[in-house]
Image: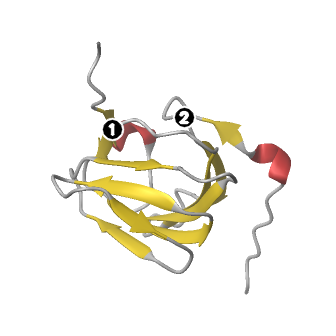
Amino acid sequence: MTTVRRVSESDEYLTEERCRILELSNDPDDPALSIARARVAPGVRTRWHRLRGISERYLILEGEGLVEVGEEPPQRVVPGDVVLIAPMQRQRITNPGPGDLLFLALCTPRFVWDAYEDIEPTL
């Protein structure tokens, strides 16, 4: 039996991290992987954060970004690039371009909010 999941653009939501997320697949019955589409508006930098016990990959679909992972300097990313993020590595991404930056966030095991840790310094 094949299960097809359909999503609606109206299900996209804005996070405190400063990006919009559309959950494409994130289900307790399929715990090995979650897939979300992230949308970062022009001029926006997401908050520093890390995930406990979850590896994440960004697959860049549209736009251009500057990604920061761990202590590495910012790296330019373009469509087709894959960013590998190990559990507990701090991460954020900036959209310096004129249009939206779109990427898939693939998490293994699946993303759960209890694993999310905001580590953005407060002023």
Tell me the residue at 23%/57% (across/down).
Answer: 87
Q: Which image quarter is the N terminus in?
A: bottom right
**Figure quadrant of residue 15:** top right
**Reading the chain from its start, which is encountered first: label 2 or label 1?**
2
Q: Compare residues 92 and 42 and report the one nearer the observer.
A: 42
Residue that appears at 52% across and 67% down: 30
**Residue 63 locus on image (x, y percent):** 62, 64
Q: Amino acid at mark 2?
A: Arg
Q: Which mark is residue 96?
A: none
Give percent across and percent down for residue 122. Answer: 29, 16
Looking at the rendered image, the quarter that the C terminus falls into is top left
Residue beneath the point at 22% across and 56% down: 73
Element at badge 1? loop
Res 56 visible: no
Across and down, in percent, residue 23 comes to: 64, 54
Residue at far top of view: 123
- Determine which residue is flagged by label 1: 48
Task: Give how far across and how far down residue 89 sits, in percent.
Answer: 22, 52
